[in-house]
Amino acid sequence: MITILLTLSLMMIIISNLFMMISFIISKKSLLDREKCSPFECGFDPKCLARIPFSLHFFLITMIFLIFDVEIALIFPMIPTFKMVNFFIWYKTSFFFIIMLLIGLYHEWNQNMLNWIN
């Protein structure tokens, strides 16, 4: 019984190593694909000088995304609490929150931050 298990495990190891060697041999990776394997973060090229000017437009677009992401996270709990609390308190809070978001959106619109192409 033990010899059968040892034989099967040895065969599995040999077959798996064989498949890994075959995939390594026929893979299309080369040194020219080095650029594809490098990380791409924040629009910076990791192979260039690190002290290049940072685009403020990119930063502000990121802030817009975070603001609207937080907005959704705060609006979702408002829906189930509608029947749990006083209607007028809920309405005032919701109205104030939505007005603040609309004022922020209007400010971003006036600053031309919603234009994706500069």
Image (cartoon, grey):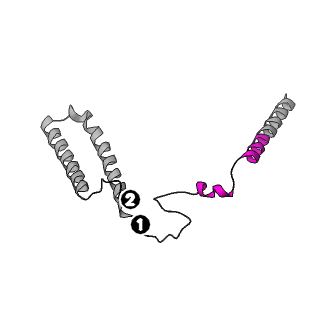
The residue positioned farthest toward the top in the image shown = 1
- Label 2 belongs to which residue? 58
Q: Secondary structure at mark 1?
A: loop
* Quarter of the image where one finds residue 85: top left
* Count of numbered marks: 2
Residue interval drawn in magenta: 16-40
Give how far across and how far down residue 7 sits, in percent.
85, 33
Q: Position of residue 12 (x, y in %)?
A: 79, 36
Is residue 81 within the magenta segment?
Answer: no
Relative vertical location of residue 4 with respect to residue 55 in this rendering, above or below: above
Give the amino acid type for the residue marked by disc 2 in the picture: Phe
Assign the C terminus to one quadrant of the image. Answer: bottom left
Whether 19 is among the magenta residues is yes
Disc marking residue 54: 1
Amino acid at circle 1? Phe
Q: For this view, does 18 lie left or right of residue 40? A: right
Q: Nearer the viewer, residue 91 or 99?
A: 99
